[in-house]
Image (spheres, grey):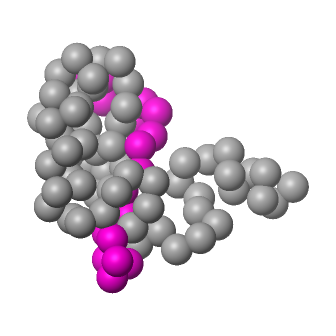
Amino acid sequence: DIVETASFYHFFHTKPSGRHRIYLSNTVIAKMNGYHAVYDALERETGARFGGTDEAGVFGLFETACIGLSDQEPAMLLDGVVFTR
């Protein structure tokens, strides 16, 4: 039950997820407003690939469903702090 619950929620991880976790909203609205450019820039600048961490374990990149900021997409959370457009 614990593993099923942890794997259901995007913000719970069962393996190392980086010291700094970045969650990029992957809604349709985000994808219409620059999501792909942000996605590419995050991978390039952090050295991590989405769904994992960089080699040093500093950054973890993850996609997530709506974070309640559809009017400001693309939006992301970096260590719980909101960043938009």
First to last magenta residue range: 54-71
Q: For the view shown, which residue lies furthest in the bottom direction?
A: 56
Image point 38% across, 25% down: which residue? 27
**Left or right of 15 in this view: 77:** left
Q: Position of residue 12 (x, y in %)?
A: 59, 58
Task: Tell me if residue 46 comes above or below residue 55 in the rendering.
Answer: above
Quarter of the image with the N terminus in it: bottom right
Q: Indicate whether 42 appears above or below 71.
A: below
Q: Is residue 67 magenta?
A: yes
Q: How many marks?
A: 0
Residue 34 colored magenta?
no
Q: Residue at x 81, y 60 (%)?
A: 2
Q: Position of residue 54 (x, y in %)?
A: 33, 71
Residue 78 sits in which quadrant? bottom left
Tell me: 23 left or right of 32. right
Q: Quadrant of residue 61?
A: bottom left
Viewer can see residue 72: no
Q: In which quarter of the view is residue 21 placed?
A: bottom left
Position in image of residue 24 (x %, y %): 33, 43
**Camera-side residue: 32 or 84?**
32
Q: Is residue 16 visible?
A: yes
Closer to us: 61 or 6: 61
Residue 84 drawn at (x, y percent): 18, 38
Vertical comparison of 46 with 36: above or below? below
The residue sitting at 23% across, 31% down in the picture is 35
Quadrant including the C terminus: top left
Check the image and report above or below for 11 versus 13: above
